[in-house]
Image (cartoon, rainbow, N blue to C red):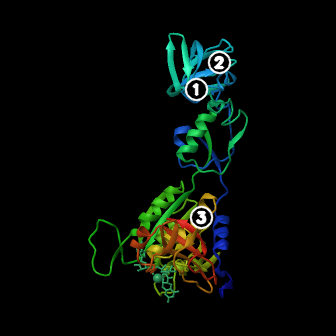
């Protein structure tokens, strides 16, 4: 890390950038939402089971419930015959005890009758008479689902801080909750900058570019559960930028793209440095090096680089973990090709996953947006660490 002449840190590492952005965001507030509105939200506190699941000991199969000890000798050649004394249906249990030599017809999810401890499925039964079945193999205790074997009443099942996926939402319902304590969504304003940047749908002249950054970032922000205020686009003049920044009031964070590198017209950089509250400028990563964090009239502003790949990669690596409070999700794969090492930067190279290994995507220019669509992953190559084929690398799925 170095220091800018005006005193703020430069060339911070990725972890420092994440932590500094996080420290600029408000600490999470809680609100309660109906179950159906919980998808994509983050649980604010652990959820305990209000009931056990299964709520009774029950059958996992359609068949008969009986005593395992009666059926140990059953084979296809020498089936064991049992007397059928009743039927247990889901919601209509059979409450009489099952004695030796007896069984009860039972269906998946129906409570086990008292005395029975094993199940034989219909596929292994032969109907012998109106009240008799023969078992072609022993009944199995493993096909009984015991009360509370999934979770017990009172158990803390879903930890706080977890993002509610469809499966976790279903689990919350099964735990007995109809309202959920979730973190208040962060409100993020989004602004793209650049004289050459044009909204999709408008005519494009040579030298102009469609505003792809805002579109990708908007979707990423929604994926992170944020409320997005789209401020559109501002031209490269101080007045236009100041007008746009003034519209971001009332949000928790302003995310911008463009205008943060070394150019004369990289005015967002100048505006933030002039405001005197820069937390850092430049991160030791590629792509995405020129990112800047500061404040504008108190509001945290994170300036993503304009290059299309850089803006989306910096979001994944720095912004997402700061917004969600969750570390970047990675997995480890073997490298099928070498990956370039940078002496003073962590690289996030685009890679293609093939046969359980990851290979270099090839052209890694930050302006090649199609590469992010054609690659499967970002391969993390730490500063100064060589990667040769066969090495294990950390990989971030795209
Ligand atoms: N002399 C140096 N030049 C550059 C350096 C450097 O260290 N020294 N860093 C390079 C790196 S790395 C990056 S990344 C870019 C960052 O540039 P800016 O953040 O200043 O962004 P702009 O100059 O405004 O635009 C760069 C590039 O991206 C295109 N762009 C911008 N906004 C959008 C958008 N919303 N949608 C699609 N594409 C966009 C823009 O047209 C430019 O092509 O600086 C390097 N330069
Ligand atoms: O690192 Mo810039 O972010 O490559 O193009
Ligand atoms: Mg620039």
Please state the horizontal and vertical placement of residue 91, each as a whole percent of the image.
Answer: 56, 19
**Tag 1 secondary structure:** strand
Q: Is residue 90 visible?
A: no
The mark closer to the camera, 3 or 2, is 2
Please state the horizontal and vertical placement of residue 105, each as a whole percent of the image.
Answer: 56, 18
Q: Which mark is residue 113?
A: 2
- The residue under the point 67% across, 73% down is 16
- The residue under the point 64% across, 32% down is 53
**Picture quadrant of residue 386:** bottom right
C-beta proximity under 8 Å, tags 1 and 2: no
| Label 1 CB sits under 8 Å from any ligand 2 atom | no
C-beta proximity under 8 Å, tags 3 and 2: no
Please state the horizontal and vertical placement of residue 379, each as a whole percent of the image.
Answer: 55, 73
Disc 1 target residue: 120
| Label 1, residues with CA under 10 Å away: few <14, some 14-19, many ≥20 | many
Disc 3 target residue: 330
């Amino acid at each position: 890390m170095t220091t800018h002449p005006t005193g703020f840190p430069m060339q911070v590492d990725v972890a420092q950038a994440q932590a500094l952005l996080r420290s600029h965001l408000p600490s999470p507030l809680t609100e309660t939402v109906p179950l159906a509105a919980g998808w994509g939200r983050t649980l604010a506190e652990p959820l305990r089971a209000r009931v056990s699941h299964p709520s009774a000991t029950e059958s996992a199969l359609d068949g008969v419930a009986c005593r395992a000890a009666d059926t140990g000798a059953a084979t296809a050649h020498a089936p064991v015959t049992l007397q059928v004394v009743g039927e247990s249906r889901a919601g209509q249990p059979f409450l009489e005890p099952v004695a030796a030599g007896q069984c009860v017809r039972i269906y998946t999810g129906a409570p086990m009758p008292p005395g029975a401890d094993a199940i034989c499925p219909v596929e292994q039964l032969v109907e012998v008479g109106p009240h008799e079945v023969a078992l072609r193999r022993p009944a199995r205790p493993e096909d009984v689902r015991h009360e509370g074997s999934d979770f017990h009443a009172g158990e803390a099942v879903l930890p706080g801080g977890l993002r509610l996926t469809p499966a976790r939402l279903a689990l919350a319902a099964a735990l007995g909750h109809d309202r959920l304590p979730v973190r208040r969504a962060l409100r993020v304003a989004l602004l793209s900058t650049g004289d050459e940047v044009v909204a999709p749908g408008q005519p494009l002249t040579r030298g102009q570019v469609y505003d792809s950054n805002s579109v990708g970032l908007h979707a990423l922000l929604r994926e992170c559960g944020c409320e997005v205020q789209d401020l559109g686009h501002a031209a490269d003049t101080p007045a236009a930028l100041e007008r746009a920044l003034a519209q971001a009031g009332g949000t928790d964070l302003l995310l911008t793209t463009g205008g943060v590198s070394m150019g004369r017209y990289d005015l967002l950089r100048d505006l933030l440095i002039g405001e005197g509250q820069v937390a850092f400028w430049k991160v030791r990563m590629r792509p995405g090096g020129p990112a800047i964090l500061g404040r504008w009239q108190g509001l945290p502003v994170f300036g993503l680089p304009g290059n299309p790949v850089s803006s989306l990669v910096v979001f994944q690596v720095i912004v997402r973990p700061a917004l969600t409070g969750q570390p970047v999700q990675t997995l480890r794969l073997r490298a099928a090709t070498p990956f370039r090492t940078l002496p003073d930067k962590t690289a996030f190279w685009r890679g293609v996953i093939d046969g359980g290994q990851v290979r270099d995507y090839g052209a890694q220019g930050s302006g090649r947006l199609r590469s992010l669509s054609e690659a499967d992953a970002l391969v993390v190559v730490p500063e100064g660490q060589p990667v040769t084929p066969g090495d294990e690398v950390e990989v971030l799925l795209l």
